[in-house]
């Protein structure tokens, strides 16, 4: 039987493979301090799209720190006091004015605090909150993240290890890519497996 930590390691290798074609070299302030982050869950994703002159173009550094590891990278700054995983992101805006950054959630994770660390980076968000029933996303709003500016370090905390989930940057246009987000609760995974099994049995009976 594969242990829980082994499954996380295997998942990390799969994530590394997924990001080979979709990420760019790390460049921001978070990237410079992410050596203690989970392997396979750190890097920089380029968000870039346009539609009839409406554009979005930004790099997002991302890193997930296991409980206690964030405090080693950023002494005295761990928002969970070492008890949870810290999901960290930092936007480097290349074009237009960023208004919102969201990280998708499954709706049943065990979540902790959400916010930003003002003295790591430049522009803090005007609001940081969980959105939707469940919730369905972690969101940071901006009023002045213009061209050439970087955000402060954005974070939320969770008791759960990471998977990938769709995340979005919104400006006068928006663009989405997968970034790290907490895994669903084990009970939800079991229910999904049971549901799949029932579907398969139903198909066999119909045949």
Image (tube, helix red, strand yellow):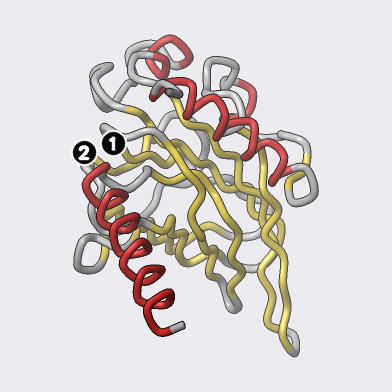
Q: Is residue 144 left or right of residue 148?
A: left
* Depth order, front residue of 182/189: 189
**Secondary element at image label 2:** strand
Residue 112 numbered tag: 2
Asked whether the beta carbons under mark 2 and mark 1 sit within 8 Å of each other, the answer is yes
Q: Position of residue 179 (x, y in %)?
A: 54, 49
The residue carrying pointer 1 sits among few (fewer than 14), some (14 to 19) or many (20 or more) residues within 10 Å by Cα, namely: many
Query: Which residue position holds label 1?
Result: 158
The residue located at (54%, 24%) in the rendering is 9
Q: Residue furthest bottom?
A: 52
Tell me where residue 191 sits by quadrant: bottom left
- Which of the pair 93/189 is nearer the observer? 189
Mark 1 residue element: strand
Q: Is residue 158 above or below residue 197?
A: above
Residue 148 picture location, percent across and down: 68, 52
| Distance from the alpha carbon under mark 2 to that under mark 1 | 5 Å
Q: Is residue 100 above or below residue 123?
A: below
* Residue 7's disc number: none
State left or right for residue 145 relative to residue 58: left
């Amino acid at each position: 039987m594969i242990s829980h930590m082994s499954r996380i390691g295997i998942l990390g290798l799969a994530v590394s493979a997924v990001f080979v074609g979709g990420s760019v070299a790390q460049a921001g302030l978070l990237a410079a301090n992410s050596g203690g982050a989970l392997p396979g869950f750190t890097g920089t994703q380029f968000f870039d799209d346009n539609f009839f002159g409406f554009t979005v173009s930004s790099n997002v550094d991302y890193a997930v720190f296991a409980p206690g590891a964030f405090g080693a990278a950023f002494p005295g700054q761990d928002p969970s006091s070492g008890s949870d995983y810290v999901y960290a992101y930092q936007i480097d805006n290349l074009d237009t004015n960023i208004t919102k950054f969201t990280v998708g959630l499954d709706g049943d994770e065990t979540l902790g605090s959400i916010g930003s660390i003002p003295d790591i980076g430049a522009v803090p968000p005007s609001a940081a909150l969980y959105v939707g029933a469940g919730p369905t996303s972690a969101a940071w709003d901006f009023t002045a993240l213009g061209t050439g500016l970087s955000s402060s370090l954005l974070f939320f905390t969770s008791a759960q290890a990471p998977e990938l989930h769709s995340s979005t940057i919104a400006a006068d246009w928006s663009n989405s890519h997968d970034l790290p987000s907490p895994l669903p609760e084990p009970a939800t995974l079991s229910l999904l497996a049971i549901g799949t099994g029932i579907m398969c049995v139903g198909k066999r009976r119909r045949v």
